[in-house]
Image (cartoon, rainbow, N blue to C red):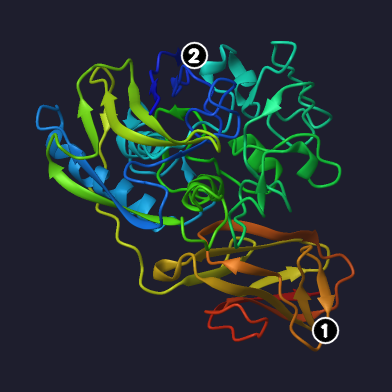
Amino acid sequence: MMVVSDSRLVNYLIGMSAIILFACPVQSGVFEFADEVHGVDTITHPKGYTGNGADLVITVGISPFSLHIDAMEVPVQNVINTWNRLIPTTGNVLIENNGMPHNQFDFESVALHELGHCLGLGHPNLASESGLSGDDRNFTKATRGANNNFDLNSGIDGVVGSSDDLRGDDVNLHWFHKESNNPFMLARVVDITTYSQSLDDLPSGDQFVVNGDRVVAELMGFKNTEAVMQQGIRSGETRRTLTADDIATLRLAMSGLDRLAGTSDDYTIELRYEGITDTADIIFEFDNQASFAACEITGNYIDLERRHIVITEGHISLNTNFSWFFNDELVMEPLEPVVTISANDSLDTVVLTQGEDLTLAVTLDPGKNAGNQADYWVKAATPLGDFWLDGQLQFRSSDLPIRVFGGALIDLSEVVFLNVRTTGWPLGSYVVTFAVDDNLDHVFDATFQNSVTFIIDP
C-alpha cells in the first residue's frame, strides 16, 4: 500500500496574548490528509481499522524517557476519558476561575487537541499551515481552488468563518450538518445522509460552511465555545471538553468505508491508558522535538478508490521551553443528569417590576446519560395560561406539551433562550420549567427537571 505521512509542528507565538497555534504542513480540513493530493473528501481512520466492523482498542501511553512523567498521568487519563465519552459540550472555553495561572499553558487542553490529530482529525479552520496570518487563518478549511489563491471575504456580518463568507472558487474541506450548518449541534445520525462537503447541500441562504471558532460561536448564541480541533490555545485558558463538531467528525469516520451508519463496516473506538511505556499505539513525550506541540502520524491507504486512509503510528511531542500547567484532578462524571434554569442569573424567586429586563437561561450536565436520545422541554406557567418553547425558540400558548428539541443529551453551559423587557406583561407569578426525558418519544415525561419562579409586581 502507498504510505502517506504528516508531521505536525507548531512554530508561531503571537503578540502579548501569547497565542500558540497548532500548525500542520498539509491541508488537513476536518480529516488529516484531506487535500488536493490525497483527495478533498479523504477520510482518515484510527490505527487498527481494516474496513470491517470492529470494536477498536487504541492504546495510549507516556514515554518512559519523557520529562514530566508523573505530572502528565492524570491529564492524559482525563483526555482519554473525554474522547471515549464523546460528549458534545458548549461553554468549554474557560479563561477566568479555571484554577490555573494566566502565564501558563494547559497541558490537558493541548493533549486533547493533539490526541484528536492522532485519531485522524484535522483543523476545521485554514490555520497556520495555510501560510495566512491573523484572523484570515480562521476562515473555514478549504483548498485554494483553480485560481491558486484563497478567496477570503467575511461577508455582511464581518465574522470570519460564518455562513455568509464569500470564498470564490475555494474548495470546501469541512464536513457540515446539512440541515443546520451549525457546528455546535449534533445530528442524531452522523454519516453522508446528514453531513456533506458540497456547498449545494448548504441550507438556503448560506454561502459557505461554518466552522467551530469561538467568535462564530458567540454570533450563533453559544458563549465561550470553540471546537477542540480549532487551531489555537491561549496561555491561561482551558479547553478540556469536546464540541459537536469534534464528535461529528470522528463519528463520520466511524461510519466506515461506505460512510453510512448502521452497516457492517462501522466501528467503535476505545482508548485505553497503558501507563509508562514506549510500545502503545499513541505515545506522549516531552522530548523537545517540536517547537511547542506536535502530532506526527503515518498512514496507509485502506481504500484508494474511495479515499480512506488508516493511521499506522502516532507520536505526540511537546517542548519543555514553555511554562506548563498540569491538572492533578481526575475528572469523574456525575451519575445522573443535572438540569438548572435561572432567571436574571438567580436560581431563587426573582421579583421584577413591569418593564424590567428578564433573562432566562438553562444548563445541562448529562452525566452518564450523555449521548442518549431524549426530548427537551421548556414550559412557562403564567397568569395567561401555559406556554411552551418551540423549536424556533418562540413561546407558544398550548394546553398540550410542545417539544423544543429532540436528540442527544449534551453538556449545555448557560444557554440563554429569552432576553426581553417585561413591559406590559400581566402582573403575577410565572413558573418556568426546563426538563429532559430519558427517551425520545415526544411524550412530556420530564424525567429530569428544574424550575425557577419570577414575580412581576406593579
The residue pinned by badge 1 equals 398
Q: Closer to the camera: disc 2 or disc 1?
A: 1
Q: Secondary structure at mark 2?
A: loop
Q: Nearer the viewer, residue 326 or 451?
A: 326
Residue 15 pos. (x, y %): 49, 14
Query: Marks 1 and 2: in contact by CB < 8 Å?
Result: no
| Number of other residues with Cα within 10 Å of mark 2, as a class: few under 14, some 14 to 19, many 20 or more | few
Residue 144 pos. (x, y %): 67, 17
Quarter assignment of residue 201: top right
In the figure, is residue 441 to the left or right of 419?
left
Q: Is residue 355 visible?
A: yes
Residue 410 pos. (x, y %): 52, 61
Q: Earlier in the sequence, mark 2 or mark 1?
A: 2
Q: Residue furthest bottom?
A: 399
State the CA–CA distance, disc 2 to disc 1. 54 Å
Q: Secondary structure at mark 1?
A: loop
Q: Is residue 348 visible?
A: no
Image quarter (top left, top right, bottom left or bottom right) of the C terminus: bottom right
In the figure, is residue 410 to the left or right of 73?
right
What residue do we see at 59% from left, 60% from top? 189
Above-or-below relation of 339 to 206: below
Residue 214 pos. (x, y %): 59, 37
Amino acid identity at mark 2: Gly
Amino acid identity at mark 1: Ser
Q: Nearer the viewer, residue 33 or 317?
A: 33
Residue 23: assigned label: none
What residue do we see at 74% from left, 83% from top? 401
What residue do we see at 62% from left, 31% from top? 173
The residue pinned by badge 2 equals 15
In the figure, is residue 393 to the left or right of 215?
right
